[in-house]
Image (cartoon, rainbow, N blue to C red):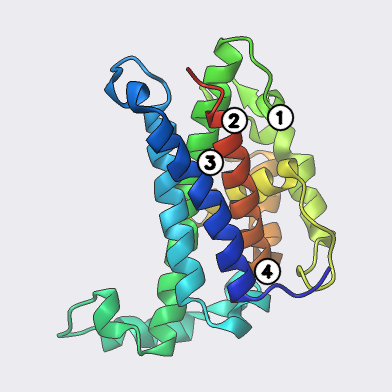
Amino acid sequence: MNVKTVQEFSEEWKKVWEKLIGQSEANESKWSNAKSQWREPFQLLGASLLYTYNAIKLMPEDMLQKTVRDAMPDQDSKIVWNSLKGKEPGFPQNNADEKFKKLASTMHVASSSFRLTTALFLIHQELLNNNASAPLVGFLKNSPPDWDRKKLTPCLRSTNNLNSCANGTPLDEETALAMTLAYRDEFGHGEEGAGSEWAKIRRGCVDQFVLCRIIEAQLLLAELGVKELAKIK
């Protein structure tokens, strides 16, 4: 598997984005139907893809092959935050600063993970309620309604040998979900599964995630989400 570039990720993103926007144009009746279960996951998928887009655009090329922690060390984060004193923290005003771009890109990756995992949950839950098949329904739980982290723990543990996209195998959907959910929990300071095996191994696994793999996982899941969303009436 070759090293993926920012440009290649941008091209993959565009293909998924166009499929999503195509659904909006083709589903006028779903926009006007107050009972439609399609609109909320559509908008969450759209928000997730917007965040992923900005993460890709801001991310320096060499950052893609770094682990999550090494990509933005605490010392660099401190420099960025201190530099914002007396300034507007908007992206246009600060995009010339390389460290700001790195920090902002990791923020966008985390924000995408929140929206994406929620969108996928809503889609799979609706399909399950209507007795329709979907690839990840086996990882849903009912009480409370959420992704079943216990069932996803083996998938998360398997990422210990994942390596970079430069020398690893392509992700499958189950592993991509485990990675994105763990990333969401870790950087959202979530306590989901506190005391469980998932919670015990999460930090160690996330520390080894290479950013190109996170972007790969998000695009794979977004494409899956767009495909499954089309089944919702």
Which residue is label 2 attached to?
Answer: 228
Mark 3 residue type: Thr
- Is residue 104 in view from this perspective? yes
Name which of mark 3 and mark 1 comes first in the sequence: 3
The mark closer to the camera, 2 or 1, is 2
Q: Secondary structure at mark 3?
A: helix
Name which of mark 2 and mark 1 comes first in the sequence: 1
Label pair 3/1, CB-CB below 8 angstroms: no
Name which of mark 4 and mark 1 comes first in the sequence: 1
Other-residue count near label 2 (Cα within 10 Å), few / some / many at <14 / 14–19 / ≥20: some
Which residue is label 1 attached to?
Answer: 135
Which residue is label 4 attached to?
Answer: 210
- For the point 64% across and 15% down, the residue is 132
Q: Is residue 131 left or right of residue 165?
A: left
Which residue is label 3 attached to?
Answer: 117
Mark 1 residue type: Pro
Image: 167 above or below 151: below
User: Residue 85: x percent and y percent?
Assistant: 20, 85
